[in-house]
Image (cartoon, helix red, strand yellow):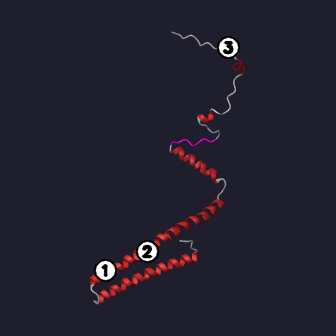
Amino acid sequence: MADLDVTKKLHVYHAVYRLNLSFAAIVNRCRLLEQSGVFRNKYLRRYQGYVQELQAEINLELVETLQSVESHDWYRYGKVRAAWEKELRDPNEVFLEAAQRREELRRQGKKPPRYGRPVLPKAVAGTAAKPRRHKAAAGGTQPRRRSAPKKT
């Protein structure tokens, strides 16, 4: 179903109301005929059942279609509200939310995520620049250290 503006949607809901009002009138007229004794009860109840089944089937089809329209409208107009709330939001509120999240993590016994220098996976870390070596180690002139003798 195409997007409905407010006026068209009002007309659709009013038509659904009038349709259900008509079904209710049919059921009420069947009850009056039942009370008058013109029709046998067995047949009137059957016809009432047919009418109410048809009403339920029509309503189901209409509700499924209208649910889709309303869900779309809810999403669309929700974006308008969210944009307005974002405009009204205090920029410092982000810091308050971060502090609340850290407190929540602390209560759960979890550490908050650390931000700063990223830790690279080993495959990527091997492609990084090689660490600097000490000048003496680079020339190979540094003497070997001897380990202390073990006491027995």
Q: Secondary structure at mark 3?
A: loop
Q: Quadrant of residue 54?
A: bottom left
**Which of the marked residues, 2 or 1, is nearer the chain's N terminus?**
1
Q: Nearer the viewer, mark 2 or mark 3?
A: 2
Distance of mark 3 from mark 1, alpha carbons?
A: 108 Å
Distance of mark 2 from mark 3, alpha carbons?
A: 93 Å
Residue occupying the point 58% across, 64% down: 78
Residue occupying the point 47% across, 78% down: 16
Q: Is residue 59 magenta?
A: no
Q: Is residue 109 above or below residue 7?
A: above
Q: Secondary structure at mark 1?
A: helix
Residue designated by label 2: 59
- For badge 3, the amino acid type reads Pro
* Residue 33: percent from left, percent from top: 32, 88
| Side (left or right) of 40 relative to 56 | left
**Which of the marked residues, 2 or 3, is nearer the chain's N terminus?**
2
Dot label at residue 8: none
Q: Is residue 139 above or below residue 113?
A: above
* Residue 59: percent from left, percent from top: 43, 74
Residue designated by label 3: 143
Q: Is residue 131 above or below residue 47?
A: above
Distance of mark 2 from mark 1, alpha carbons?
A: 20 Å
Dot label at residue 46: 1
Residue occupying the point 54% across, 45% down: 105
Which stretch did the figure color magenta? 109-115
**Which of the marked residues, 3 or 1, is nearer the chain's N terminus?**
1
